[in-house]
Amino acid sequence: MTRSFYIKTFGCQMNDRDSEIMAQSLGEHDYAETLQVDDADLVILNTCSIRAKAEQKVMSLLGYLRKIKQKKPELKICVAGCVAQQEGKRLVEKMPHVDVVAGTQHIYHIPQLLAEAQRQNGPRVAVELSDSYAIPRFIPDTGPSSPASAPATLQETEFSRFVTIMQGCNNYCTYCVVPYTRGREVSRNLKDIEDEVDVLVKSGVREITLLGQNVNSYGSTNAVTDDGSPCSFPQLLERIAGIDNLQRLRFTTSNPKDLSEELMRCFRDLPSLCPQFHLPVQSGSNAVLKKMNRKYSIEKYKYLVDVLRNYCPEIVLTTDVIVGFPGETEEDFAQTMALLESVRFDGSFSFKYSDRPGTASLALPDKVPEEQKASRLSRFQRRQDEISLERNTMYIGEMHEVMVEKRDTEKYRCRARTNHVVHVRSEEYLEPGQIVDVTITHAGQHSLQAQYGSNPIIS
């Protein structure tokens, strides 16, 4: 009998890819996905604990699911991902209606964990981390040997996919839970990555995004080739970019401390590598960066930006910023604002600092009052929006290549190689996944508008 499942995903692209893996695994065990939580026999919350707000949303949704389960006792509830890894048995103690708690290294075995919970007539908690953990192998000719080893079944409209190249992190930034929830850094086998991308491209995928907590250090902590020869991230990019018919290649995320000139040259030398780079800075103050254990200076960061823009003048640069880190003074924050003026990021993800369980910053003194954090965040975001609009306005009148994502009422939602969302008007029908050249007609803070075809009306 086919059962239905619903997955709610919180957090980053890595979690999006993990949800794909879980969906494939369940599909191989007679489950079918539903888009309505109330219709599901199984609900999976794939969670993120990088910030307190995301964790609070999970707990709120679990409260809602408790009410559903009271009316529908046969409903199974699984909490997976980083909150599961962080909380473990405490999650079941707080939320006894949860059937399975699956940590980040156990998402590949959701069907088995559900069966074990059924047999023992009680919750199953699997959160053990292993430093020797490796992502299962990809075997394209005989079918997947495990849920993680192959891409999920492609839908007709899927033309852009994530591919995981590594798991975990060794950096131990003082505010970050990732080393504790994802484990130590492990890079994936090079041939497995190539084989997976090749299968995806042959299935019609045109754009690949390579994923890792710090892709810049790919290959530095374990062997990634069958013969043990080294392979750096730039070398991996060259191999993937050489796969026939791959039209767009992206990656995320990078730590500036590991950014090499060899990698920066890839933006000049690899035509399929999109001119878009997310390079988290976190703060403009060297004093704060030291407390964060980021292991680079603002001077080094600005140097890297200059080199990037020299190799690829059209590159779009985005970043992450945390305001209100413990001990951050008004002068420290002023240095972050000065960095924003100097670099003029095309966009940024900015957040108020929040204490996270198990991190070193939890014990730091001089916590910044909430109202000061809110004020600083508002000031930063307001100026970032102004700069984003100024930079986006420069595209008006230019022709850009976009990939069609979907139809939105009278326009098409598309994505430029720079990763800008572009809303396109067209008298012709455009297929999802189709790549066309459009003329930018209008700029907003967070997106562009364009016309496909002749006689665009430019604002």
Image (tube, rainbow, N blue to C red):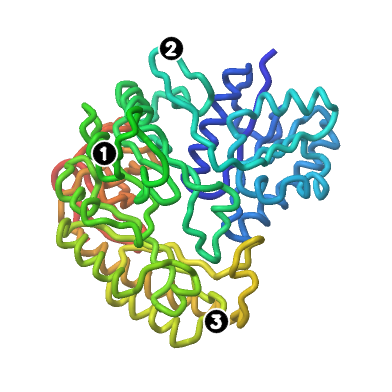
Residue 118 horizontal/vertical position (percent): 80, 25
Q: Is residue 316 left or right of residue 69?
A: left
> Where 304 sits versus 335, above or below?
above
Say if residue 411 shows up in the picture. Answer: no
Q: Residue type at mark 1: give it.
A: Arg
How busy is the neighbourhood of tag 2: few (under 14 within 10 Å), some, or many (20 plus)? few
Q: Residue type at mark 3: give it.
A: Gly
Closest to the observer: 407 or 221? 221
Sequence-wise, which precedes: disc 3 or disc 1? 1
Q: Is residue 115 left or right of residue 347?
A: right
Residue 211 horizontal/vertical position (percent): 41, 43
Sequence-wise, which precedes: disc 2 or disc 1? 2
Q: Which residue is under mark 1?
A: 248
User: Which image quadrant: the N terminus?
Assistant: top right
Q: Quadrant of residue 356?
A: bottom right
Say if residue 47 shows up in the picture. Answer: yes
**Viewer-nearest of labels 3 and 1?**
3
Residue 344 horizontal/vertical position (percent): 29, 70
Q: Which residue is under mark 3?
A: 327
Q: Quadrant of residue 385?
A: bottom left
Q: Separation of disc 2 and disc 1 at Cα?
A: 28 Å
Q: Secondary structure at mark 2?
A: loop
Q: Which residue is under mark 2?
A: 142
